[in-house]
Image: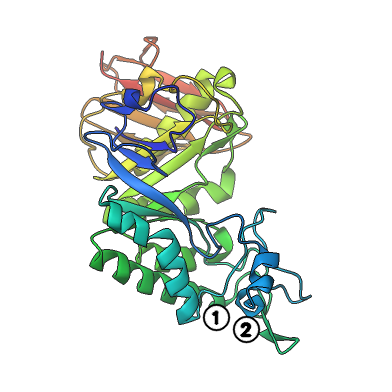
Amino acid sequence: MGTAQIFAYYLDDRGVLVGRRDIIWGDEGPKLPGIYSMKYMTVDRDLDAKHNVAWYEAQGRSDWVMRKCDGSPATEFDDSNAPVDITRPEIREFLYAQAVTPVVKSKRFDAMAVDNIFSTNTFGRCGNVEGGKLKRRYSGTHVDPTFANDVADWLRWLGARLHADGLCMAGNLWYEEQDIEGFRSLAKLLDIVVDEGGFTRNCKANVVDGHWLPRMKAMRDVAREQPLIVIDYVCPSAADMTPAALDWSLANFLLLRGESTYLAIRPDKSEQGPLYDPPQLHVVTGRPMGDFKQEQGVFYRRFEKAIALVNPSSVLRAEFDLAPDDRWRDLRGVSYAGKVKLAPGSGLVLVAP
C-alpha cells in the first residue's frame, strides 16, 4: 500500500521514514532518499503568520484583505494569517514570491503542498474595502459559483507557474456533499489530490449511511485518474488507536485505491516521539480484481491476496459470505471462513493465509 507522512518535524528521527513512507506532505530538513517531498504553502492566506490584518493595514494594503459581508476579516481557522484576494495579479505574484520562489531556488523539493482548498465559500468571503467602503464580489452564500470560478482560475495560474519552475502541485481539497461537482472540477486542476476528510475521527467512522457512498464514489473516481493522498486522523492520540478503528480506515482506503493512491494514517494530535507505523499499514494485497461491489449491506473489493469489507450503516449489522472453501485471516492473524459478521460502521481486511 502506498503510504504518506503528514509533516515530520515532530518525529525523534526523520530518517525512520526511509523505506516506510513514499511521500512527505509539508516536508522540512534534508531530503530523504526515495521519498517524494512536498513543501507547504497556503492557498489563499499569507503564509507568514506575522502578516496579519494589522500588518497589511500598516503597509497600506488593507484592500488586499478579504472580508466578510459585515466588514470583518474573513479569517480561517481562527488563525492570524491574513486572508487575501487571490484574483488580483499583484497578490498572486506576492504569494508566489514569498512561498514558492525560495523553494524553486533550493532545488530541494518535488512539489508544493497547497493547503485548505475549498470549492465552497466556507469562511464567508464577501469582498474587500476600497475607499472606506466594502466592494462586494461574492454573495456570502456557502455555495457560490463566482467564488468557485475564482479558486479555479487561481489554481490554473498557480499550476502553470509551478510547472514552469519544475514543480508539481498537490492540493488539500476539501470534499463537501453540497458541492460535489465543484470538488470534481477543482480536483482536475491538481497534479495530486489530497483528502484530509478521511474515514475516521475519534476512533469511529465519520462518514456513514447515505453520505458514505457519494463520497466514496467521488474519491474512487479521483483515484482512477490521478494520484490521491488520503489523510485519516483516526484517533485523538496514538495510545487511543483501536484495532476496529484501524480496520475501518484500511478497508475504506482499499475500496477506493487506484494505481497511485496513498494513505496517511495518524493520530489527530501530532505527538513528539517515534513514528506511528503499525504493521497493518504495510499489508500486501496484490493487485485489485476490479472495482468495489455491494452484496446486501456490505461493500467489498477483492485483491489478488486480500479482500476488503465495509459496512457503512451506522445502525444495521451486516454479513458477508466467503466462498465455501476459502480460508482467510485478519490483520492480527485471526482465521475466518464462511459468513463474516460486520458491526455497524465497521470494516475488515482479510488476507490469504
Dot 2 or dot 1: first in sequence order is: 2
Q: At numbered mark 2, what does the secondary structure look like: helix, strand or loop? A: loop
Assign a secondary structure to mark 1: helix
Rendered location of residue 94, percent (x, y): 46, 71
Check the picture and name the quadrant holding the N terminus.
top left
Q: Residue furthest right?
A: 70
Q: In this view of the protein, can residue 45 be seen by the observer? A: yes
Mark 1: give few (<14), some (14-19) or many (20+) Cα within 10 Å.
some
Query: Quadrant of residue 304 in the image?
Result: top left
Query: Is 353 on the left or on the right of 236, as rendered?
Result: left
The amino acid type of the residue labelled 2 equals: Arg
Q: Where in the figure is residue 225, as x and y percent of width and height? A: 27, 57
Image: 220 above or below 188? above
Marks 2 and 1, Cα distance to the nearest angstrom?
8 Å
Q: Is residue 305 above or below residue 60?
A: above
Choose mark 2 or mark 1, whichever is in front: 2
Whole-percent x, y for residue 232 in the image? 49, 37
Tag of residue 137: 2
Please indicate, yes or no, whether residue 299 appears anywhere in the rendered image. Answer: no
Report the residue marked by disc 1: 146
Residue 144 % position (x, y): 59, 76
- State yes or no: discs 2 and 1 in contact (Cβ < 8 Å): yes
